[in-house]
Image (cartoon, coloured by chain):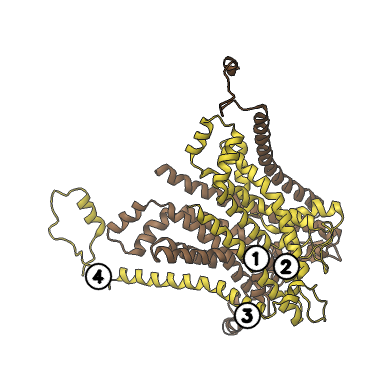
Chain colours: A yellow, B brown
Amino acid sequence: MSEPNLTATAALIALGASEAPRSLPNLNRAPFEIRALKSGFLTALTWIAALLASVPLFSVIYRLAIEGGSRLDWEALTALPPSAFEQGGGFGNAIVGTLVMVGLATLMSVPIGIFAAIYLAILDPDSRLAHSVRFLSKALTGFPSILAGVFVYAVLVVTMKTYSALAGGVALAVLMLPTVVLAAEQAMMMVPKKMKDAAFGMGCTRAQVIWKVVLPTGAPGILTGVMLAIAGAAGNSAPLLFTALFSGYYLTSLTEPTASLAILIFNFSGMPYDNQIELAWAASLVLVMVVLVFNILARIIGRQKH
Amino acid sequence: MASHHFDHVDRSGSVSGPPSAGDYVFDRGFRGVAWLSAVFILALVVYIVIEIGGKALPAFSEYGFGFLTSTTWNVQTGQFGILPEIWGTLYSSLLALIIGGVFGVAIAIFLTQDFLHGHLAAVFRTIIELLAAIPSVVYGLWGIYVLIPLLRPVANWLHGEFGFVPFFGTSLSGPGLGPAALVLAIMILPTVASISVDALHQVPYKVKEAAYGMGTTRWEAILKVMLPTAGSGILAALVLGFGRALGETMALAMLIGNSNQISLSLFSPANTLAALLASSFPEAGPVEVRALMYAALVLLAITLIVNAIGLAVMKFATRKFEAER
């Protein structure tokens, strides 16, 4: 049972060895030799690792469905958060607050992100500015979200002297921006050069080429990026902690403290009252559903492209 | 100018013509806005660094570098130090990197080395990507009410039997470093996996074919050919995953116990820079805010450095393959 010396044999064959090896090595499959067993063992380990890694997702979803689902009713979706010993209540104001702040962030980050991506992908892809913006956008994707909160606190909250939905929206926009820029740039670079050349050949200005050819063609990819950015922003809470803070009431103006689902979950999860903890689970279920809907939308739009 | 010669041509029946003045203005304006947006991003990042740095300056001049090595955080006496938080940040992220890295790379191998058929692989990839979509606070909630109760008996048994090992030196009473690091590992796993998948996809197919042609087993091909060839890309995945772990906030603020101490034990409560910011900032007075701004600057510096290293390694990895083609 001598192991075939593969390297040497292969080298001989490759060199077209003038002297044929006296005896052919054993070329039969040996499923029980050590190296085959080792391979099988590692394969089994990988399967276990892969299955283990999907346990948390299913565990989270299962618990959300059980604990959150039992409490999710019309009252939970519309009522105001309860105070300490109060029963019932809900998180209607937090849903509104999250939607408003994510909406604001989208309105701010998407136009700037797409225009910046136009510059990076089409107008001047190899300029120094493009290289640095591309690098900084990538670096910003790894930017701790809490620091966006610190930044906006220093810039907006201190100067406006109040926590506000506006500040929360700006903080989320800072975090959405790099996702939008990088996805939009990628999508626009995928637009075939032929199409752009054809448009230029017809005498289009650069703006016309981008507006009428590149953007419509790249739209699915850009939308995918936007959806993913929205999903990320909706679930993000760290930057809202000290920009939007929290509020027990429905939003009446953009310049007052605002409730959000994520902060409500954070606040309620640490409370020693069952009612609040149940509401935290129900709010988590709503939040995860919102995030998953945008994620799935992103996938569907992204898939249509091919 | 060129159109001068054609002025006498009757164009009323034609659809073609030079761009109108309006087209020129639109073109100029459009490109101007695009340029401005790109500059805006550059300016934004510079502004973030300057703003946080500037706000940290008073605390920096007051506490100096002693801030980084002191262990007390006392608002009453005005003593501030973040050594326990730096320790907790690095320790929890490192643990998360070890667990998340092993699983992340294993999953990348699982997805790229023909373990699953196309359709199933796509489903599994979606599952892993959705792990990254679950919001941090939801992981925190899950950690408090599912993971910690599950871990507590195991942890306390380990402490009882192997209490002399520094890692098991305390019992797990509630929140602690171990559960926090485990959740952190789950959160960075998709990052590590997806960048590693890209790295493994970049290895030319013929390299794998050649290895199999030599008669290697599947794992000899993976360990001796695929992983070394994709090595720098996988390294980038690990570094970027580490960077992600350093800045993660909410789940840690909920799970790590916010305790100002340095301990090797996996089961003792600890704190991280991001969690310190999250838990102290909302109620902080002006003196504490200045100290927190300094802590924010330290966090910014650490993550920027780690991310820059990760991006540089990734660029190097991509370039290597571009050169080979």
Q: Amino acid at mark 4?
A: Ala
Return the disc, 2 or 1, that comes first in the chain's sequence: 2
| Residues beneath discs 3 and 4 located on the same chain | yes
* Residue at mark 3 to residue at mark 2: CA–CA distance: 19 Å
**Direction from residue B125 to residue A94 in the image, left or right:** right
Label 2 close to label 1 by CB (< 8 Å): yes
Q: Earlier in the sequence, mark 3 or mark 4?
A: 4
Q: Which mark is residue A290?
A: 1
The residue that mark 2 highlights is A261
For badge 3, the amino acid type reads: Ile
Reading the chain from its start, which is encountered first: label 4 or label 1? Answer: 4
User: Which mark is first along the chain, 2 or 4?
Assistant: 4
Check contact, mark 4 vs mark 1: CB within 8 A.
no
Q: CA distance from mark 3 to mark 4?
A: 50 Å
Q: Is residue A125 above or below residue B58?
A: above
Image quadrant in which you'd find residue B112: bottom left
Disc 3 target residue? A66
Q: Nearer the viewer, residue B19 or A294?
A: B19
- CA gap between label 4 and label 1 equals 53 Å
Give the label, 3 or 4, closer to the camera.
3
Percent position (x, y) of residue B32? Answer: 68, 35
> How far, Cα to Cα, is label 2 from label 1?
11 Å
Do marks 2 and 1 share a subunit?
Answer: yes
